[in-house]
Amino acid sequence: MRHNIFIISLLSVTLLFTGCEDFLTDKPESVLTSSDFYTTPERIEVGVIGCYVGMKRIMNDEWQFTEIRSDNTCVAQVNSGSDTRVRLANYAHFSVLPSEQSILDYWYNTYQNIATVNTILPSVQDTSYIKIEEDRAAYNAELRFIRAYHYFTLVNLFGDMFEVTETIGPEDALSIPRSPVLDVYNNIIIPDLKIAAEDAPSIADAGRITEWAAKGLLAKAYMHMGGLENLGLAKTILEEFVIESKSPHGLLDTVPDIFDITKEMNNEIIFAIRYAGVSGNGSPFFENFAPSGTKDVFPVGSAGGDGNNNPSFELISKFENDLNDSRNQFFDIYSRSFDAPYILKFVDYGMTDYSAAENDWIVLRYADIVLLYAEILAQDGNHADAHTYVNQIRARAGKSLVTDPFTSKEMALDEVYLERRLELAFENHRWFDLLRMNQSYNDPNKAMDILIQHTFLRDWYFLYGLYSKIPLPVQANYNNDHLLLPIPQDEIDGNAELDIKQNPGY
Amino acid sequence: MKRILSLIVVVGAYLILGQSSLFGQNTLSGVVTDASLNGEPLIGASIAIKGTMVGTISDYEGKYTLIAPTDTGTLVFSYVGYVKQELKFIGAQVINVELSFDAEVLEEVVVVAYGTQKKSHLTGAVSSLKNDGLDEIAVSRADQALVGKLAGVQVLNTDGLAGSEPSIRIRGAASISASSDPLIVIDGFPMPEGSDAMSMVNMGDVESIEVLKDAASSALYGSRASSGVILITTRSGASKKTKYNFKTYTGISTPIKLPDMMNNVEYLELLYEEGDKRIADPAVDGDRAITQRFYDVTDNERLGYLLATQLLAEPTDWEKEALRNFGTISNYQLSASGGSEEVQFYVSGGYNSDKSIMKKSEYNKFSFRTKLDAKLSDRIKVGTNFAANYSKKERPEGDLTDYQRFHSYIPVYHTEATAAFTGATVGDYAQASDFYDANLTGIGVDGTVWNETTNSAWTTSHNSPVSIRDRFSRLDNRYTLSGNAYLSIDILKGLKFTTTNGVYYSYNEYNEKVQSNAEGDGEINRLIREMDTDINLLSENILSYDKSFGNHSFNVIAGFTAQQENIRDNEIEGTGFADEEIMQFDGASNIIKDGTNSYYERQAMMSVLGRIIYDYKGKYLASVAVRSDGSTKFPKGNQWGAFPSGSVGWRISEEDFMSSLSSVSNLKIRASYGLTGNDNIATYSYLNKVATLYPDGEVKDYQLGSGILSGLTPTENALGNPELSWEKLEEVNLGFDLGFVRNRYTLSLEYYDANSLDLLLTQPAMDITGHKTAWNNIGKVNNKGIEIELKAGLISSANFSWIVSGNFAKNKNTLLAYGGKEFEDNSGMRSEKYRAEVGEESIVYYGFETDGIWMTYDEVEAEDPGTYSVFLPAAGGIKVVDQDLNDTIDFRDRTNIGSPFPDFTWAVTNTFSYKNLDASFLFQGSQGGELINGNASNFEPIRLDRAYTNNRWVSPMYPGDGQTVYATNTSKAELLLSDYVVEDASYIALRDITIGYTLPENIAKALSINYLRVYVSARNLLYLMGENYRGINPEARKTNSEYNNPLVDGYQQGVFPLTRSFTFGLDISF
């Protein structure tokens, strides 16, 4: 008996030893790993979908940098000194610190999606993973478009940029300097968009990249690069839309239809970030932009929306000059103890849950293309013709037309940019327009002058006369250096090998 | 020696017996002397006749006399620290006795890794704590009772909620990314990390707690031991008559300190008082006289004042609404133990209830333990050890800040007046939104009429904290079972084989039920259910061999162990339930995808281990051990690691040349070296993972024309590394033990120097990689320090004794390498930074040093604003130091402004006993660490908190203390960047006082009970906090989210108050 137990015990020990190999073999039960993951068409498909999601994640916050800092909006609308409001005020007043967390978050999310694109891109090009050449081309176009889009916004918001086009490790990152903006255009944005324009299908599943999305963004990229040659390149592309009508896109009959949630991905939409009116997939803009404390405007909750992105009274006054302009109905004023203006482009009165609004976020639409074309005409000596295209937009809106051709470049530019501002308000265009204005007017102070006027003259009373809880703007901060956001401090501190220069003025 | 003594006694007794008398009453007398001190008399020894209440005490010559009521009986001689003797008497006799010193004190046996060892023969650093009154400390968890008990073991109660797990650090933080939690081993079963194992132990069941502090002592736990090992040994049965024991205590607790908050009325009074001061100040002239006088008073605030004065009988004290009048704690435990020569058992059941002073914070625990040991034959023993626990923990939604920020013009429930004013219903929760667009006219603070129309005193999207709390239910129900069975066989003389096989099972279910309109009106109801299962299997097979020959003795063990853990975590979230009481997921209108997921994983470790302990003549001691672990946490090729150790000791006091120094009862020096490991990182860290969710839980779904599709991308914050391996800790320990006068005075000194190598580090990566960090084995940290444990039996007589014991620990932490970088700034939840800089402590608060505040307008105007890219000068605002003296203030002017690590920790216990009364006092403290008081980042509460408004700057003529910033003259983000929020975390606490009375044995006998003790105790009766500390609980720290990073520590915000408790207890056994 005793001996038996001893033998059994020893035996079990021996058995355990021999089972070593199996015992320590670990196959993750719930975890997928990225090495060798994107090797089948199905997995590449979910990877590419993930890149669209990455773009959506960034879009949720982009208005903070492209609308809040422009003259379209004002921060203060309720008398609150909440963290969010102070942060947005710091953006609006160009007094943001390099340590600001939300800049880092945006930066990180952008580079995270770039890294994802860079991870999947080689698999797309590998002919052994996807056999159908057409599919390979379409995926290639999608990934490159997304990467180009990210670099385009990065250089416009932050200036000189780190070029990352393949998977890199922490050590590799330390040797990458900031490349001049022009290099980023020439090395990444333009080539990627050219390939995307080449490879993308003309029509795709609603929401995916098409040839026309790539061409639209390519034209815009050329225009931001500036110079007559680039304007010429842009013009040729835009003519495919507006002159040759090669694209399936055009203007809808009425403006409100563009934003109607029952008519999403309509003919005017060239590219949009798509949201579904389902919890977890909804668009956050309705909640973000609806006024705070509005039980009757915002269908969910008593607190209403967050009231974080409000039209300036000056912007609204631009419409009141012409009451026939159907775009007036996008602006309303909620009256409580004070007047709170708000934007109605992104509303979904049928929503049942916070952040479950249906509204897509339009990135490129035909009216933008038309006005870009007008903008080029204004610049390249054909300013007289520009009024035709401005009138296309005005006519559709129901606004009176510009009767006579523009007589000067300045006049043409003034009208084109005004029309862009009115037509595309709150669609993340105004900031980019302001940046281009410095070039087109050939005046490096143009944008900042407008912003100073907006803050300190036109909207001061409504912005700051009533609401005291946010820090007041300081005019010294309104300088051209601050047209760029600071590079996140962590990114500078994080590189001990290269001396990463902060943008001037921070 | 002992044998000779007993022979003498027996012979003596025999001789005395011959002189016996046959009369009914006998006079017994004699002298009690000390056997070892050449027959010196023992003063105050107690002499009693067994089974009676007759007894006496020896006088100063050691003499005694007493009259025995019967002819025959047994005399019992006892003296503290001496071996008790019982001698029979017949008739009147002279009985002289020599009592010998109880060598058992030295021969105390302590539990070590995979065995036990005589304390005198230890060669490593092991602190041992017998459960001597530990179970009388009124805390709901065993680990909370360890505060101050052991040198070098720091127990920090990081939040004030009932049943919360404290943070335990042994000899400082050894790791910079993996966890520095010690390994907990309960009755030989290494508990899985993160299992909150200590919550399952009922202190009443604990026999002893040993802490293996140096690497040599803990090396047999190999790859999990580098943060130290805590061994818990539970009580076992004994071969005697069944003994029943019932222990209970019950008590109440109250907060030591609460923030001193103003209400709306007091706040406005303050602003007007300050306004009056400004108007009296000639410096407040011109425009300033208008803009500055009341420059913080808004119409909204004036309206708040009017609402509070006109609608309410008195302003609402929201802070009070967060708290109960007092917390309660109670504990009940019943146990039975006993057995025969062959079978012994211990069975216990306990119930513990802890209601903290925060409303809706409650912890209830039921625990059961059964231990059975059976001798099947002379050579075979079997046994089981089985424990079952059930605990229920309720947590409130919201922290103290949520109450402090709430305006006092809002009542908790609508009164007649507020209902009439707002149109709400009497008795409903009052919300800030009910008071929007108010019109009110009335007399203001300044006596003038204020006319406030269509205004909102406070616009907030938050509901009142009471209504939020009432509509939230957050419950953890945890069930654990652990059981193991062992079989041990004596194969040959000295050779024994033991196999222990066990299972630990834990199921934790968290339910968060939220009713509609909880945080804001219109919010829909929801239920989050998390179901976490952990199944852990262990097999340990140990062969041990004991052998002595001549002057040599050996103990050798060799073993093989295997442990496997299966984790099954499931989570589901639904919203829009038709019924709020009965929430079933099939009744949910939505299942939320990012709250619904499952995670399954398996971890396994297999190990071989061996140890040889050798001594020569009981004087020269040596030990070598090695463990080799194979773990699934690392990639193939890096799975196995070996952890060797060695130690030596010399018991100098046993040497012949020491015999002349008879007062030195113990003198030993020890030295050890060992290597241990740390695998306490997330599983699969070596892999780059692809997931359907972002780390923050956002779903990767995308709507296309063809429908909603799911994305699958690698978006983990940390980049995997296929080369990952163990962290290692290399530690040298030098020890010195000294005992005087038969160890009435003892001193133990430890010096250690530990290098943590190959530290697993989520090496910060530039964000342009698409990741925040990357795993690597690149860090190196040194911890060196000293620990002192002292004990002095200052007075030791039969009636009265006074023992002082104390401990002191000082640890110095230095970061030696950080992946080739000079430093790294880690972020917390606000703008504060934690710098890890090579050559410094591994956490240094990094920010701006302040130099008081700007006192005058002239001073500010004289400054060139171009100088400042941060901290723009403003009168009453903070002034920072230009560290690099380059006449600009920017981010380069940051410097080290504090550290979370204390300089030293200490504790002193005084134990007195007088006859049957005893009292003990534990003073305990921590000196020199700092914390970041994040409350300053919360404008709304600190506006009203007198800790931030007393002595603040008002105007140049009224600068306050010249240190306190006026309101938001410096922004919150900037305050958090500066040493303005770095506060002293030192404290001195009278942690425990216990005063008890034990019924004399003879009375107890008469009542036919074995033992009866009653006591009262108080925890934190005195508590001194650091001078510049503005908070209410210097021990509290935030430990979740950002603060889960070992390099980000020392931040507190919205913490619950420390409490003082008073309890009454009873311990009875029969």
Image: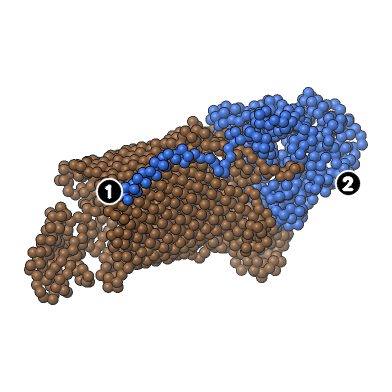
Chain colours: A blue, B brown
Which residue type does callout 2 highlight?
Asn
Which element carries disc 2, helix, strand or loop? loop
Figure disc tally: 2
**Of the pair A475 and B543, the residue shown nearer to us:** B543
Q: Position of residue B734 (x, y in %)?
A: 31, 40
Q: Is residue B828 left or right of residue A380?
A: left
Which residue type does callout 1 highlight?
Lys
Q: For residue A106, which quarter of the picture?
A: top right
Q: Is residue B854 left or right of residue A443?
A: left
Asked if residue A221 shows in the view, the reply is: no
User: How packed is label 2: few (under 14 Cα within 10 Å), some, or many (20 or more)?
Assistant: few
Which element carries disc 1, helix, strand or loop? strand
Q: Position of residue B78 (x, y in %)?
A: 20, 62
**Of the pair A140 and B431, the residue shown nearer to us:** A140
Look at mark 1 in the image and give the residue it sits on: B118
Q: Which mark is residue B891?
A: none
Q: Position of residue B29 (x, y in %)?
A: 12, 67
Asked if residue B251 shows in the view, the reply is: yes
Q: Which quarter shows the C terminus of chain A?
A: top right
Cβ–Cβ below 8 Å for labels 1 and 2?
no
Q: For residue B235, which quarter of the picture?
A: bottom left
Q: Is residue A395 left or right of residue B1058?
A: right
Tell me the chain of label 1: B
Q: Position of residue B552 (x, y in %)?
A: 22, 41
Question: Which of pointers 1 and 2 indicates the residue nearer the eye?
Answer: 1
Look at mark 2 in the image and give the residue it sits on: A324
Q: For residue B395, which quarter of the picture?
A: bottom right
Residue at the location (23% across, 47% down)? B666
Residue at the location (7% across, 68% down)? B19
Which residue lies most toward the bottom here?
Answer: B24
